[in-house]
Image (spheres, rainbow, N blue to C red):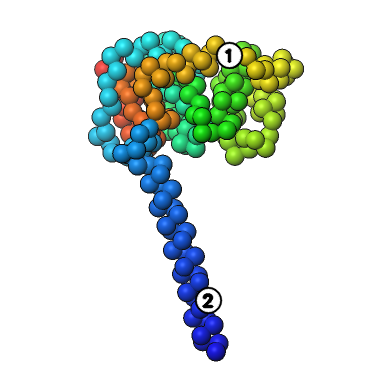
Amino acid sequence: MKLREAGSSALVVVAVLCAVVTTAITIRREFFSTSAPGAVTEITNPNAKPVRVDDWQKYATGGHRIGPANAPVTIVEFAEFECPYCKALALGPLEYIRAKYPGQVSIIFRQMPMSYHRFAYPAARAAECAGMQGRFEQFHDVVFAGQDSLGLKSFDEFAAAAGVGDLTTFSLCSKGSQALPGVQADIAAGKELGVRGTPTFLVNGGMMVGVPDTTVLERLIVKALAAR
């Protein structure tokens, strides 16, 4: 009897493990499929070739700049604050690039909140409000670092952590109902460019969709610097 019970328990464990593995595979296919419209991909091929956007400079005229205006390399990033892949890009490859090439690379963040993320648009709005007080970069970093707290922590708390000075004005702005021109302009630019998934980014006009590993992104930066 005990052997039979042990065998049944083992079968249950195996069944649970199989279910977990199957779920993980399904999630991976859901988010990393290259055939689905707007799919986000892992960019690990060091020879991956960006799609050239000849008029890319017009997409660099809006949004919020992180880095010097005269940097020889510009990364235009269409992203949103609830997207886990945007977080992976911000806290991984882009954080590395910002630290290693502080005077040579400038990042222009353009808001592209996706409708299926509940907190994406409110976060975009809050980021614009922080930007009105000159604290966009700090708010950007704080929200991505604390992305798991979206919906649990108020944007006022994120703003305080980002050093926003006038929290009363920020709170009124972030809780307002009127459309903010900056967010609307970014969304319009993203639609014009054909952005269907986040993050989508351009490195001096070379466009890619997904999360590149650090080696891939740095190769693009080095190539862009050499072409200047």
Considering the numbered disc 1 on the image, is that residue within a helix, a strand or a loop? loop
Q: Amino acid at mark 1?
A: Leu
Mark 1, other Cα within 10 Å: few <14 / some 14–19 / many ≥20: some
Q: Nearer the viewer, residue 43 or 27?
A: 27
Q: Is 82 positioned to the left or the right of 26 in the image?
A: right
The residue tagged 1 is 180
Q: Picture quarter containing residue 69?
A: top left
Could you tell me residue 113's position as x and y percent?
A: 51, 26
Could you tell me residue 202's position as x and y percent?
A: 36, 22
Q: Nearer the viewer, residue 87 or 163?
A: 87
Q: Could you tell which of marks 1 and 2 lies nearer the N-terminus?
A: 2
Residue 92 visible in rendering:
no
Q: Which residue: 59% across, 31% down?
A: 119
Could you tell me residue 107's position as x and y percent?
A: 44, 20
Q: Picture quarter containing residue 120?
A: top right
Please tell me whether residue 55 is drawn above or below residue 152 in the rendered image.
Answer: above
The residue tagged 2 is 9
Q: Which residue: 40% across, 52% down?
A: 25
Please tell me whether residue 144 is drawn above or below residue 129 in the rendered image.
Answer: below
Q: Nearer the viewer, residue 77 or 197?
A: 197
Q: Is 85 positioned to the left or the right of 206 in the image?
A: right
Q: Which residue: 52% across, 81% down?
A: 6
Q: Is 105 positioned to the left or the right of 5 in the image?
A: left
- Name the quadrant of the N terminus: bottom right
> Number of labelled discs?
2
Considering the numbered disc 2 on the image, is that residue within a helix, a strand or a loop? helix
Please tell me whether residue 54 is drawn above or below residue 140 in the rendered image.
Answer: above
Q: Amino acid at mark 2?
A: Ser
* Residue that sits furthest to the right in the current view: 168
Q: CA distance from mark 1 to mark 2?
A: 57 Å
